[in-house]
């Protein structure tokens, strides 16, 4: 009970006021009986009233001081959080700006140590959710770093984690009471990576863009295909089981022609309801709803093709 009173100042102050009020109430009757004159009774009542008002004022001023101190502390922590969040994103932005075409960069161990201490600072001021996400990002980066060669290799999943971390920072700063949906974050990342690499000379139909993003997103986020296993072409991309990009290691080819998508996979048996020619099936802009309905089946066919080619290479 004593420990509880030490921790809960509000309850302690309220209890203190209650005890004084109750004691004063009990003391009034015998005191007034001994003070026969009315003037003496009024004087005693005035003294008790003054004491009680002074105690109440003291408690209120103490609470006000605590509130102002808490507000000041929260403002300073808020400012420190903004500075730290920006430091993390600026650090990661510098790394991404210097990646080569294979998403690799040579960085010293010092940079990894800097990232490690940014995590330590995050532990100091961040909430559990933001710390956990940054820890996940830190682990992904350190696991992709080769100390012997000082080469760091990043892929689309790293960038997705960065955007998710930024979203958690936004929530922690009180700028939003909920996180963005997973699909929205993936869409942001895909828009930057996929269509920056595709060299389309004509603008694509919106439904075609969404279908390509769904296919590429499955490759990147579900099959975890690194970008060095993907060869971008002027009208599409080829995907391989390894970074050698040997034709025998290719398990998917996606090309765009006249606003239509052509998907070539070695195991197309599961594909239904789409025009199929040998191992290639075609998706028209008007077939977006059909694609959504068959998306799980198409993804299974792509995964089967990946596993088939992988077995063939053993």
Image (spheres, helix red, strand yellow):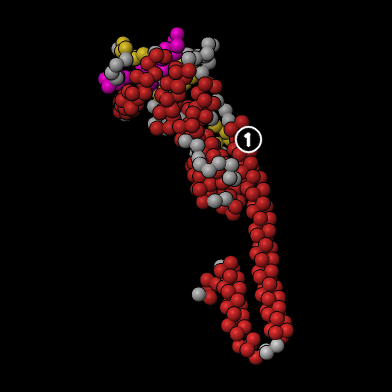
Residue at image coords 52%, 21% = 195
Residue at image coords 52%, 34% = 159
In the rendered picture of this protein, how many numbered marks are placed on residues? Answer: 1
| x, y percent for residue 62 | 67, 67
| x, y percent for residue 314 | 32, 29
Q: Is residue 220 left or right of residue 29?
A: left
Q: Is residue 242 left or right of residue 104?
A: left
User: Which portion, as a residue range, is magenta?
Assistant: 248-270
Q: Is residue 251 magenta?
A: yes
Within the image, what quadrant is residue 166 found in?
A: top right
User: Which sits in the foreground, 32 or 230?
Assistant: 32
Q: Is residue 27 above or below residue 50?
A: below
Q: Is residue 309 magenta?
A: no
Q: Which residue is mark 1?
A: 94
Q: Is residue 138 visible?
A: no
User: Which sits in the foreground, 60 or 279?
Assistant: 60
| x, y percent for residue 274 | 32, 15
Residue at image coords 61%, 80% = 24
Q: Secondary structure at mark 1?
A: helix
- Taking the view exactly as shown, the residue that stands out farthest to the left is 269
| x, y percent for residue 293 | 33, 23
User: Which sits in the foreground, 240 or 119?
Assistant: 119
Residue at image coords 26%, 20% = 269
């Amino acid at each position: 009970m004593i420990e509880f009173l030490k921790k809960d100042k509000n309850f302690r102050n309220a209890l203190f006021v209650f005890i004084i009020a109750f004691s004063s109430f009990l003391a009034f009757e015998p005191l007034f009986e001994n003070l026969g004159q009315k003037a003496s009774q009024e004087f005693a009542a005035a003294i008790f009233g003054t004491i009680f008002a002074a105690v109440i004022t003291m408690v209120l001023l103490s609470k006000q001081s605590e509130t102002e101190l808490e507000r000041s502390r929260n403002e300073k922590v808020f400012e420190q959080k903004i500075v730290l969040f920006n430091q993390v994103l600026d650090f990661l932005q510098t790394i991404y700006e210097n990646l080569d075409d294979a998403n690799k960069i040579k960085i010293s161990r010092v940079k990894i140590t800097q990232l490690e201490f940014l995590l330590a600072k995050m532990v100091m001021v961040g909430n559990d959710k933001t710390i956990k996400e940054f820890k996940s990002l830190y682990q992904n980066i350190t696991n992709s770093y080769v100390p012997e060669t000082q080469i760091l290799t990043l892929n689309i999943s790293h960038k997705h984690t960065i955007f998710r971390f930024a979203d958690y920072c936004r929530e922690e700063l009180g700028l939003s009471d909920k996180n963005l949906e997973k699909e929205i974050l993936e869409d942001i990342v895909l828009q930057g990576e996929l269509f920056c690499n595709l060299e389309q000379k004509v603008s694509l139909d919106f439904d075609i863009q969404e279908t390509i993003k769904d296919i590429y997103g499955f490759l990147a986020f579900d099959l975890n295909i690194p970008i060095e296993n993907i060869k971008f072409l002027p009208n599409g991309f080829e995907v391989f089981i390894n970074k050698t990009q040997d034709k025998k290691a290719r398990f998917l080819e996606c090309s765009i022609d006249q606003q239509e998508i052509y998907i070539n996979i070695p195991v197309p048996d599961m594909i239904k309801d789409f025009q199929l020619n040998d191992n290639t099936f075609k998706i028209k802009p008007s077939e977006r709803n059909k694609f959504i309905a068959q998306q799980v089946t198409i993804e299974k066919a792509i995964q089967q093709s990946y596993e088939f080619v992988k077995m063939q290479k053993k």
